[in-house]
Amino acid sequence: MRQRAYIALGANLEDPEAHVSAAIDALAKLPESTLVARSSLYRTAPVGLAAQPDFINAVAAVDTGIAPDDLLEALFAIERQFGRVRHEKNGPRTLDLDLLLYGDQVINTPHLHLPHPRLHLRAFVIVPLAEIAPDCRLPGRGTVAAWVPATANQGIARLP
């Protein structure tokens, strides 16, 4: 059975706009999956490690028959295609893909937490997600749109 999954994309090394756009194209080619929406691109300030370039972020929605664990592995494979190397937490990267939501499932395993634990607190996720799915419900937290004001103090700008 297909589920709607939402995936956050971010990059701040090399050509981040091109990487995020190409990664969205890669999501559209996942087996048993259909890309159904993609947000605009957004420029955001880094969170955590501040001494690095700004990020380019977006969110994509796919309808998929891939199980959550397998989808996460597919996202890691796409990251590797774009040269992602995990050196430091919140550090600069060529591409970062985060599985935000998978239907209304709540999953807490050592390697997968759904919904993504901080998605509602980060402008670089909640603003692009609200662009494509404002009425989407976050399990236990209400709608996506309801969380946008909580991130109003975070720097984010929609790219033309």
Image (cartoon, rainbow, N blue to C red):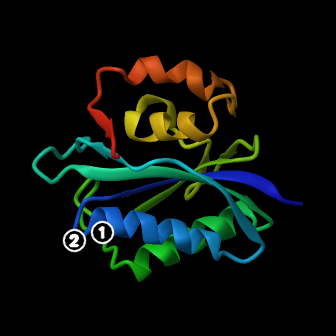
Write down the residue under mark 2.
14
Q: Quadrant of residue 70?
A: bottom right
Residue 118 on image: x %, y %:
47, 36
Disc 2 residue crowd, few under 14, some 14–19, many 20+, Cα 10 Å = few
Q: Residue at x 23, y 41 (%)?
A: 45
Q: Amino acid at mark 1?
A: Thr
Q: Is residue 118 left or right of residue 5?
A: left
Which of the marked residues, 2 or 1, is nearer the chain's N terminus?
A: 2
Residue 91 visible in the shown view: yes
> Mark 2 is on which residue type?
Glu
Crowding around mark 1 (Cα neighbors within 10 Å: few <14, some 14 to 19, many 20+) is many
Q: Which residue reaches farthest front?
A: 160
Give the x, y percent position of residue 73: 58, 72
Q: Quadrant of residue 156?
A: top left
- Please identify the residue farthest to the right as the structure is shown: 1
The label shown at residue 127 is none
Q: Are marks 2 and 1 in contact (CB under 8 Å)?
A: yes
Question: What residue is shown at x 48% (from left), y 40% (from top)?
Answer: 128
Q: Is residue 141 above or below residue 22?
A: above
Q: How many marks?
A: 2
